[in-house]
Image (cartoon, rainbow, N blue to C red):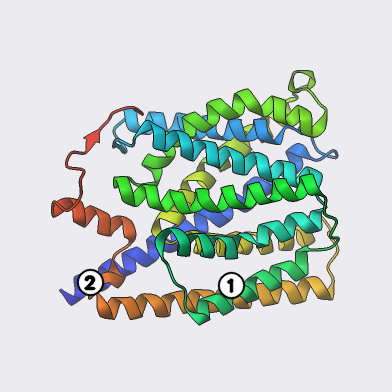
Amino acid sequence: MEKERKSSSVNVVVSDVGAWGMNIISSVGIIMANKQLMSPSGFAFAFATTLTGFHFSVTALVGLVSNAAGYSASKHVPMWELLWFSIVANMSISGMNFSLMLNSVGFYQISKLSMIPVVCVMEWILHGKHYSKEVKMAVTVVVVGVGICTVTDMNVNAKGFLCACVAILSTSFQQISIGSLQKKYSVSSFELLSKTAPIQALSLLILGPVIDYYLTGKLLSNYKLSSGAFFFILLSCSLAVFCNVSQYLCIGRFSAVSFQVLGHMKTVCVLTLGWLLFDSELTLKNILGVVLAVVGMVVYSSAVEVEKKANSKIIPGKESLSEEDSQLLKEDNGESGVNDVELGKSIG
């Protein structure tokens, strides 16, 4: 019994590390691919919102094929839940794009950093979740560290501030909702993504060109697609599948706050690769910020592990189960409201 518990714990750790690794590698990869695709010195594809529509189209196609082939289960989630979630997710994407256009880069980075405390407050309001002093301290160190190495100028205007607020609130609410919907309807991360991706893809493909025209003044129909640009669009879409799947997987297994901390780890990786690959300026301030952010992430991981062990003493055996594993056990014991698992069905 003890061997089985240890083996289960090892499997969970390996799965967790795999999810984190997939998200970091795919996210950093997609940023580098998009940099080449969208930069004026690259292929000058300036249609960010439309590109996101392409991303979700490919993700939806992968989900549809997976369900049709029977590789993943299809459980019922009410359409109204999928619709409001997709609206919030699209508001997040559009809000971020508008915020970047209307605000300085410095204020845009500040708005991204503010998502961690906003997520904490929203989880406390919506779910009554509390955080230890160690977690709060670690999160503060991460935010300060990333702020030091990314924030430069700070110009704010009314429209930009409003867009930033919409982006922060919608992104935070979306990330909290991913975990909530998985638990509420006993669906896996990939199942939920398979159901929301087609809605987001359709809406972004319709609205994306309009939003991009407002942002850039350029029409998608006037863009001359080269073979190189087409390759990087395919590469970006392929990486987006892994990025989207790992995002839902990470939030489902951990929490929205942990995912935000992971996001800043990706920021550190992007900055480091920028210095190594693109000859970005490397200053003492940047190095100090990166070191401080990494220290904060290590402290955060340690604090979360301490909380898990403390909870496991209250609920024996809890540390060896992920949230998805716990939900599956509930289904087996008849505690879940979902009794039947339909395999091989397409998205409903």
Residue 338: image x %, image y %?
A: 21, 43
Q: Residues within 10 Å of mark 1 (few under 14, many from 20)?
A: many
Q: Which residue is mark 1?
A: 139
Q: Which residue is mark 2?
A: 5
The kind of residue tagged 1 is: Val
Question: Residue at (61%, 25%) from the top-left corner?
Answer: 205
Residue 134: image x %, image y %?
A: 51, 81
Question: Foreground: 108 or 329?
Answer: 108
The relative height of residue 202 versus residue 129 in the rendered view (above or below) is above
The kind of residue tagged 2 is: Arg
The relative height of residue 310 versus residue 90 in the rendered view (above or below) is below
The relative height of residue 334 versus residue 255 in the rendered view (above or below) is above
User: Marks 2 and 1, Cα distance to the nearest angstrom?
Assistant: 31 Å
Residue 294: image x %, image y %?
A: 63, 73
Question: Residue at (29%, 33%) from the top-left corner?
Answer: 70
Residue 5: image x %, image y %?
A: 22, 71
- Sooner in the amino-acid sequence: mark 2 or mark 1: 2
Tag of residue 164: none
Location of the C terminus (image quadrant): top left
Question: Foreground: 147 or 26?
Answer: 147
Question: Residue at (42%, 36%) from the top-left corner?
Answer: 82
The relative height of residue 342 versus residue 127 in the rendered view (above or below) is above
Location of the N terminus (image quadrant): bottom left
Q: Is residue 44 visible?
A: no
Give the side of residue 193 with respect to residue 287, left or right.
left
Secondary structure of the residue carrying numbered label 2: helix
Question: Residue at (75%, 18%) from the top-left corner?
Answer: 221
**Res 91 → quadrant:** top right
Give the side of residue 168 with respect to residue 20, left or right.
right
Give the side of residue 200 with respect to residue 230, left or right.
left
Give the side of residue 240 with respect to residue 14, left or right.
right
Secondary structure of the residue carrying numbered label 1: helix
